Image (cartoon, grey):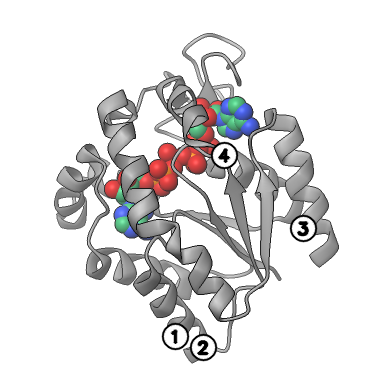
Amino acid sequence: MMRLVLLGPPGAGKGTACMSIIENYGLIHMSSGDILRAERAANSELGQKAQGYMDSGQLVPDDVIIGMMIGAIQKAEGGYVLDGFPRTVLQGEELDKALDAIGGKIDAVLDLQVPDEVIEARMTGRRSCPACGGVYHIINLKPKVEGQCDKGCGELTQRADDVPEVVANRLKIYHEQTAAVVGYYKSVDKKIIEINANQAVDDVKASVIAELDKLS
Ligand code: AP5
């Protein structure tokens, strides 16, 4: 049973890589962004709290996210891959404390590396399926029928935080607050697997699977 953390800047391809990971290893995909978007769609109190932060590219406050994600992790049956969490050093510390308490641990941390210049085109061209969470790109990963999810769920949508001004803010926040999470995991001797995510989708997928095959 593998428990993984996937790190990397916004638009690095974390969600895309997770699709291959869950297909190959049967892990549960736990994306903090997807959980928050579902809370917003349900108009829950948590979703309403998160809305302003997400739309402007800020991080949702740690106290909101930590409770939400640790609650979900404690209910998970089997291995999982965490996508978008932890995103601050405090989130990483609290995750480790919660896992210690239930006798669990993160087996490896994958760090997807992509230069900032590549990110904007990835995010502004992204289209997502609000029903199944599928991720496409208008040039790099086209759906079979333009604008429609390949799984038959219906129309693809563009995320409100994928416009250039918000993308720039998300990248700034990543460098200020999230990049340090890699340092945190190094400081506690966690295995860090660096992945060159500035390659074609299939090549990134092959690199990730080759690395994870060594662990399983
Ligand atoms: P979240 O949803 O987690 O967004 P993110 O981390 O910014 O990551 P993205 O989902 O934008 O990108 P990705 O790396 O998954 O890339 P993808 O595979 O889609 O978070 C959204 C917001 O929620 C945050 O801003 C924050 O407000 C809040 N939040 C979430 N978690 C939080 C936390 N822990 N703490 C506080 N706040 C939190 O790929 C992008 C595009 O590129 C796609 O179109 C894809 O088809 C394409 N693509 C992928 N790989 C490649 C490739 N190799 N080559 C070419 N194109 C590619």
Whether residue 74 appears in this view of the structure is yes
Cα separation between marks 2 and 1: 5 Å
Where in the figure is residue 87, as x and y percent of width and height?
A: 40, 60
Q: Residues within 10 Å of mark 2 (few under 14, many from 20)?
A: few
Cα separation between marks 3 and 2: 23 Å
Where in the figure is residue 166, as x and y percent of width and height?
A: 27, 33
Using the image, determine if residue 92 lies above or below residue 165: below
Amino acid carrying label 1: it is: Lys
**Count of residue discs:** 4
Q: Residues within 10 Å of mark 1 (few under 14, many from 20)?
A: some
Residue farthest to the top?
A: 146
**Residue at the spot x=84%, y=62% of the render?**
214
Label 4 CB less than 8 angstroms from ligand 1: yes
Q: Label 1 near label 2: C-beta < 8 Å?
A: yes
Q: Secondary structure at mark 3?
A: helix
**Residue 134 marker:** none
**Residue 212 marker:** 3
Say which residue label 1 marks: 97
Cα separation between marks 1 and 4: 30 Å
Cα separation between marks 3 and 1: 25 Å
Q: Label 2 near label 3: C-beta < 8 Å?
A: no
First of labels 3, 2 by sequence position: 2
First of labels 4, 3 by sequence position: 4
Amino acid carrying label 4: it is: Val
Label 2 CB less than 8 angstroms from ligand 1: no
Say which residue label 2 marks: 100
Residue 179 picture quarter: bottom left
Amino acid carrying label 2: it is: Asp
Say which residue label 4 marks: 114
Q: Quick one: quadrant of the N terminus?
A: bottom right
Between 38 and 175, the one lying in front of the other is 175
Amino acid carrying label 3: it is: Leu
